[in-house]
Image (spheres, rainbow, N blue to C red):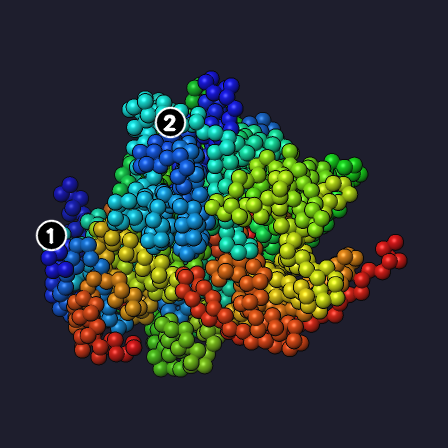
Amino acid sequence: MANAGRACDTFPKLMRMHAAERSDRPAFRHKDRGVWRTWSWRQAYDNVRGLAEGLREAGVVHGDKIAIVGANRPMLYWAVTAAQMLRAVPVPVYADAVADEMAFVLENADVKVAIAQDQEQVDKLLSIRDRLPHLTRIYYDEDRGLSDYDHTDLQSLESLMAAGSAALQKDSGLARAMDASIDHGAADDASIMLYTSGTTGRSKGVVLAAGRSVAAARDTVAFDHLNDQDSQLAYLPLAWVGDHYMNYAQAYVAGSCICCPEGPDTVQDDLREIGPSFYFAPPRVFESMLTRVTIRMEDAGALKKKMFDHFIAHARRWGESILNRQPVPLAARLHYALGEALVYGPLKNVLGFSNIRVAYTAGEAIGADLFSFYRSIGLNLKQLYGQTEAFLYVTAHPDGAIRAETVGLPAPNVHIRIADDGEVQFKSPGQFLHYYKEAEKTAETLTEDGYVKTGDAGFFEEDGQLRILDRAKDVGKLANGVIFAPKYIENKLKFFPNIKEAVAFGDQKDFVTAMLNIELTAVGNWAERNGVSYASYQELAGHPRVYELIKGHVDEVNAALAREPRMAGAQISRFLILPKELDADDGELTRTQKVRRSFIAERYAPLAAGLYDGSEIADISTEVTFEDGRKGVISGRVRIADLSPHAPASKERAA
Amino acid sequence: MMHLLYQIFIDPFVQMAGAPDLLVQTLWEGFVGGMLYALIALGFVLIFKASGVFNFAQGIMMVFAALTMVGLYEKGVPAPLALLLAIGVMYLLAVAVERLILRPLVNQPDIMLFMATFGLTYVLIGVGELIFGGSPKEVPTAQLGLPKGAYDIHAFGGLVSLQKIDIAAALIASIMVAALAVFFQKTRIGRALRAVADDHQAALSVGISLNQIWVIVWFTAGVVALATGIMWGARSDVSFSLQVIALKALPVLILGGFTSVPGAIVGGLIIGIGEKLGEFYWGPLVGGGIDSWLAYAIALAFLLFKPEGLFGEKIIERI
Amino acid sequence: MFYREVGQFKTNYAADQAIFPIRQDRIGLALILLVAFIVIPLFGGEFLIASVMIPFLVLALAAIGLNILVGYTGLISLGAAAFMGVGAYACYKLSTIFPEVNIVVWIVASGFVSAAVGVLFGLPSLRIKGFYLAIATLAAQFFLQWCFQRVPWLYNYNTSGAIEVPTHTLFGVPVTGASATPVTRYYVVLTIVVGMTWVAANLVHGRIGRNWMAVRDMDIAAQLMGIRLLPAKLLAFAVSSFYVGVAGALMVFMWLGAAEPEAFNINQSFILLFMVIIGGLGSLIGSFLGAALIHILPIIVRMVPDALGIPIGAATVEHLTFIITGAMIIFFLVVEPHGLARLWAIAKQKLRVWPFPY
Amino acid sequence: MSERETLLSVSNVSLSFGGVKAISDVSFNIAKGEIRAIIGPNGAGKTSMLNVINGFYHPQQGQISFNGVMRKRMKPYEAASQGIARTFQNVALFKGMSTLDNILAGRALKMHKSFFWQMFRYGPALDEEIEHRKFCEEIIDFLEIEHIRKAPVGSLPYGLQKRVELGRALAMEPTLLLLDEPMAGMNLEEKQDMSRFIIDVNQHYGTTVALIEHDIGVVMDLSDRIVVLEYGHKIADGTPDEVKSDQKVIDAYLGVAH
């Protein structure tokens, strides 16, 4: 084999190797038109070459930026590789971004060619075209609705690929040139540009190098023993580092199969059908899954419910120990085996988890309860900590030493240190090259000795595992000097299925307050059960009995905080429930669903003021964006509830 | 071949003309049978009109009612009291049907209710036979004040024999039909019953609940069944083989339409007379016994030309 | 609970359109066939095979036939037993006229005779609908039964008026008549029933089945989509009668050995209809379940008092059977109008989503 | 619009049921490729008109020609085989079947493989089944109903049922698509979706659409031309703007509604 000796330090080279070594193994699956279409590595490679040739003929050259907008589709993944084959830089864009957001990214990245999934994305691109002087051509994957469009600068990927493949077939010179282009691909080529979600301020284009990306993925593939028998469901945004790493990079290194769901509505069904062996999801996915489990079990018959609760309780007691291969009494093991047959096995089956060997969660902190629930039923769920700048991994849980509060040990070949001000800093193999066109920002982020500043505050536990507290700049102090870590408190709140989002305030204030979002499914279900009638989300959110319910949860959080010496002083004194759901379309959340605390404080200023001036009711009127993009105004009065703090855990009891 | 055609198309009419007394006798018997068919069919129509249920059990209700009366009599109950008790049993049956079948199955497709009446049929057969035994029983005609014997009339060149019980049956049938017609047209409940067939809400406005209406209708149908059963029984015996006769009311319904009272009467007469004539004049050609299916064949023939029956409403299919 | 469907994804339409797309169902089916073909003949007693299994299979086949008409096409028939009779008499006549031809061939061929008669009596179905049609099918019931009684040619002029099955052999082994062992007869019946069930499953899952169901669910819409009602209905009559006819032939040749016209009376028609209703309209599995329940119930009613030591007359047993059957129909209609098949479907769904309730 | 070829023309059609006139002497035509609306108050004879067009009712007087061919008494299935498809005011899906089977049933006219192969679900029968499944999957994709592909239609919400019904009609690859109140009982978002589908069907498949709809706003947006019926009579016929300003229409209909 021609390439055996050469190191595969780019994704096109990896793909070429798989096409040769495991040509018939499935590389991509896509549930399309009701069945799982499958492409082997060979077929996928040929398609990518066709695409690359087509793009080359369209004038794409080394260094060009190619925007890729859409959901997870093999064609779009191929476009990524095709771009890399030409040593151009793919720039995936969040598919749900509104035209304005998209314009910013495309403008900033000097995109030359845009690849869109369907009519919706093409429409968005066309609407912002005036602002993109470099954009020459747009390609699309699904042709529905596009036949009447002006095709001067518009073409289907299908035809581009066909033309490219035909050209390669006909002209062996072109084929050789393409091989050469792959060979020319170098480790320090910019491999991809991912825009940060921009929790704070505008998003920045993180440029990652090919060699570093492959190296990082190699480390983790070895770490988790992934190989070409594995498969994963690619359902997270293409533009998110999580998807690019977990699905794209790892699959290209391990030779495993990337499975694309039919659509956003069918992810759960598709997950169950495909039964992946490797799974990655942010905590909110696990959370909503557990919420659904709980709600559905509420409707079960008394006996079944009892059985379920019994075995789940048993799992909570022993499940993690069994998963961690710790010594467990035989009786408990047998009991667990029975539970596996009656509850855990079937539950994993309906959730689509039966075949999973390793599952990861990252992106946000995960609740200990939530985390251990999945582990207790036998899902090998682990946490990792990372960021786009690191090409995801900074730390990860090793097998056998997994705790919800920590994010694990440094990943292979990653060096971590805690700066004097408590900020976590790292140096990793996958580390980014620079922010695109933001040399200043790049310099700010990197230390002089080449470490990356994460902006997160954290510390190492005794066993060497890293524990993350909060964004370093968010960690504040109450007026009385007590440390206030808003995220820490928010996460504790969000671990309750009834609470969807929480925003905590307290920096430089006398006490801590919170704005909450209820989870409509869970609370709606509760309301139905308890005879609470409501006509709208707003009405439910403001219902006195819902306040009572939520107050109970907040009180529990306070009790938990009271048990931690560092946090006891930062209990929540007042809270309110927002009359609308926080929404990325309104700028309240980032596209990765993180709350923008300061923006919210500004937007709901009257409410924020109300939380601190002792009033029981505050009025608010705010603009909302509806599903179809229209805007409207929600206004109303919001009640504010008070709580009394718990006494900190006494020293005697602790001792 | 010619012979066969002659036998089918000529010979029977020659016979009719040759022996008019036999023809009249046959017609009379057909008429009486037809009146009784009409009475059974009327029970169907009553229930179908008021509750939309095609009551397959109507035939068995007839047998069951008669069997109850006769069975009680045989157990030593005086005949008039047995009659009253049988009426009471039919009332209980109506209540039970409303409670156990109609109420739980309300709003189900018609076919479900139709099937349920099959179940009812089986239950009634089982219960009837379990309590009163399967052997044929004689109706105590004398004790019920029904006449016996026959008037022999010498006419039409021969002898026409009219059984008194047949005359009584025809009379009683006529009276019941008339009474029901009056009940439907003139009384408040009757009008409510008619209304309920078209519009359940309308019935409620008359101040009678739907459930009460069902009980009343089924009870009325039960009383009609009792009367019919006694008449048939008096002419032969009471046993479950009468059930097959009851099934003959079905072609009557096809002919007359499910919702028409006059249709039931005319249909009954057509079937009754047609069947007797067919059996008497054409039956021997094919070995006899054709009355078991002739009624259906007649009805089917009609149906092919008029799918909604003689008096049924024209079906306009809406979409 | 036993269903573990994770990873059972389909990569082509043939697999996705399969009649049993779930692996566990295929395994279950294989187990059932294994029991039916091997375990029962090996370990079953004569009573089980001759008095339980053979009648059950024959009745199930008839129920499938009737279900095609009533359940899949929505045409109520009250004359199914008569078509069993047609099959039985056709087979009887064919095998006496051409005794040298293999009897299994005639059993199947008798289905065609039944189908032809079925089409004839199905003709009014274009103009007649619903209850009217149900009553019209009674014409078939009474007319055909009358033929069995009054046309001596049909029963070879036997003085008894009944038909009796002589011994026929298949590959030298007696399969009918007194010398055929129950196991042999069982295998013949089982093979035919399994084969025909498979064909029925293929039909109802394809274009033909869809057309039938379209006619059943909304005949007007079906017409406006280009489905011609008469051919669709007549095909249903033909296929249904074929199945019922073969079941009739099997009943006489493989089960009873002899039959009188009374065997095909209206009560038998009702019994078949009950099997279909209780089993579940529009379900092949339901046909088997319904046949099992209705056939096995009387056996139990007979055995329970015996087992409890309560003397009970044969007549009383029959009356009780009537009452229980009737009550059961009402009970099912009230509690689960879609029959045992729906219960089975619900149970299966529960197992699939276990531990969730739905 | 006038230069467009006429696909269907209705001339002087009258229809009555037992003496009650449902349609009196109505004439209009539908041009190839247009979206034609029939509006009017309840009981104006709109649905009866559709029923006449697809051969379900036979007018006592008047004539209908489709694709230039005059027709006498036509059976509904003949109308179907000529390319007239239909949805219904009260969803007329096959309740006992899944979404996919309903749409597949719409392919009835295009499937011909013999009973013999059907018996074994093998060879040509299976190939045909798969070929048409592919076609139906395009419709499922088009109407965005992937998630309910295998669901029994009886259990679906009303809006989705209407969508499935449209899918079933599209499966017939119709030349003329009759829609009877396609948006009745829908919320705003569902109406927008449905409008989009109707426009897409019209523009990209070139299907001629005739629809009855009560939501005047939607009708005005969607249609090229509108016929207005009242008590079985035609009172106006023209483009949305013409109809909107027609005094008779305003008096009879629009005035009441707005």
The residue lying toward the viewer, choosing from B17 and A595, is A595
Q: Residue at x 34, y 65 (%)?
A: D184
| Horizontal side, residue C279 vs residue B245: left or right | right
Q: Where is residue C65 in the image (x, y as percent from the top left)?
A: 40, 42
Q: In this view, does D178 lie above or below A401?
A: below
| Horizontal side, residue C292 vs residue C130: left or right | right
> Subunit of mark 2?
A
In this rendering, which labeled residue sits more in front, label 2 or label 1? 2
Label 1 belongs to which residue?
D69
Q: Are marks 2 and 1 on the same chain?
A: no
Q: Distance between the residues labelled 2 and 1?
A: 59 Å
Task: Name the quadrant containing residue A572.
Answer: bottom right
Looking at the rendered structure, the secondary structure element under dot 1 is strand
Q: Which residue is drawn at 53% across and 58% down?
A: A589
Label 2 belongs to which residue?
A178
Q: In which quarter of the image is the C terminus of chain A?
A: bottom right
The residue lying toward the viewer, choosing from D51 and C141, is D51
Q: How many labels does the image show?
A: 2
> Subunit of mark 1?
D
Q: Which residue is drawn at 47% across and 17% down?
A: A1
